[in-house]
Structures are given as C-alpha cells and as structure tokens.
Amino acid sequence: MRAMPLRAKITIIFLSLALFIFVLNLIRKRSLKIEHSVLWLGVSGVILVASIWQDLADSIAFFVGIEYPPALFLSIAIFFFLVILMHFSMELSKLKDQNKTLTQELALSNNLIKDLQKRTTYLYEDSTLNEG
C-alpha cells in the first residue's frame, strides 16, 4: 500500500472541513434544515476520517474485497448520493401530495367565497328593492 502524498492529504482534510463548516453555516442561516444536513455532515465526517487514517480506509477496502483502495471512496460516494437522491425523492413525493391537498382546499374555499358573495349580493339587492 502506497501512502497518500502529504499535499493531497492536507487538501482532502481541508475540503472535508470546509464542507462541514459550510453545512453548519447553512443550518445557522436556516437555509438548510437539520434533517437534510445529517447526510452531508456524515459525508464530510467519513471523508475526514478516511483521509486522516488512510490505513483504516485501506484495511476496510481490502476487507470488503476492493483491491484498489481509492475505489472504496468512489463506492462510498455513490452510496451516499443514492441515499441522498432517495431521501429527496421521498420529500418530493410528500410535497406533491401536500400540494394536491392544498390545491383542493383552495378550490373549495374559493367556491365557498363565490357562493357567499352571490348570497350577499342577492340579499343586498332584495333589501334595496323592499326599501324603494
């Protein structure tokens, strides 16, 4: 097993810490909800641990049967992206159902308002005819 060059190791550590801080900043600004940030914080944590303890990542790769350790990182990245895509697909389905319900409720409310306006107009016209 060949050791990762120091410059590459420092770059990966810096990028994983930058991702972690970026996600925390998005949470602080309320641009990202905590439940959506867990996966991103997990990704940055896994990258950080794997870059600091390269021997651990190499051992895991060989234990799983991956002969080329960097392929482990690619496999982990693909897995995380699939999990994130599934999570957002579930959120999108939920929002679609909520949107349909809200649209139906709005249509019922608009229908009720129009009905009340007609009744009010009718009552107003009827009262002005009785006065005159």
Image (spheres, helix red, strand yellow):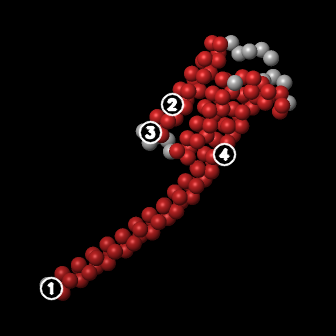
Q: Residues within 10 Å of mark 1 (few under 14, many from 20)?
A: few
Q: Amino acid at mark 1?
A: Glu
Q: Are marks 2 and 4 in contact (CB under 8 Å)?
A: no
Label 3 SS: helix
Residue 69 bears which disc, if any?
Answer: none
The location of residue 58, given as percent across then percent down, is 77, 24
Residue 70 in view of the camera = no
Image position of 16 with respect to 84: above or below: above
The location of residue 111, given as percent across then percent down, is 41, 70
Label 1 SS: helix
Quadrant where the N terminus sits is top right
Residue 86 bears which disc, if any?
Answer: 4
Residue 21 bears which disc, if any?
Answer: 2
Instruction: Give how far apart the Cα atoms at labels 4 and 1 are.
Output: 67 Å
Q: Earlier in the sequence, mark 2 or mark 1?
A: 2
Query: Residue extending furthest bottom?
Result: 130
In which quadrant of the rendered view does residue 20 lie? top right
Q: Residues within 10 Å of mark 3 (few under 14, many from 20)?
A: few
For the residue pair 117 and 30, the one nearer the viewer reads as 30
Instruction: Give how far apart the Cα atoms at labels 3 and 2 are.
Output: 10 Å
Q: Amino acid at mark 3?
A: Arg
Q: Is residue 32 left or right of residue 86?
A: left
Image position of 30 with respect to 3: above or below: below
Q: Are marks 4 and 1 in contact (CB under 8 Å)?
A: no
Q: Nearer the viewer, mark 4 or mark 1?
A: 4
Residue 5 in view of the camera = yes
Image position of 131 with respect to 60: above or below: below
Q: Amino acid at mark 2?
A: Ile
Q: Earlier in the sequence, mark 4 or mark 1?
A: 4
Instruction: Give how far apart the Cα atoms at labels 4 and 3 are.
Output: 25 Å
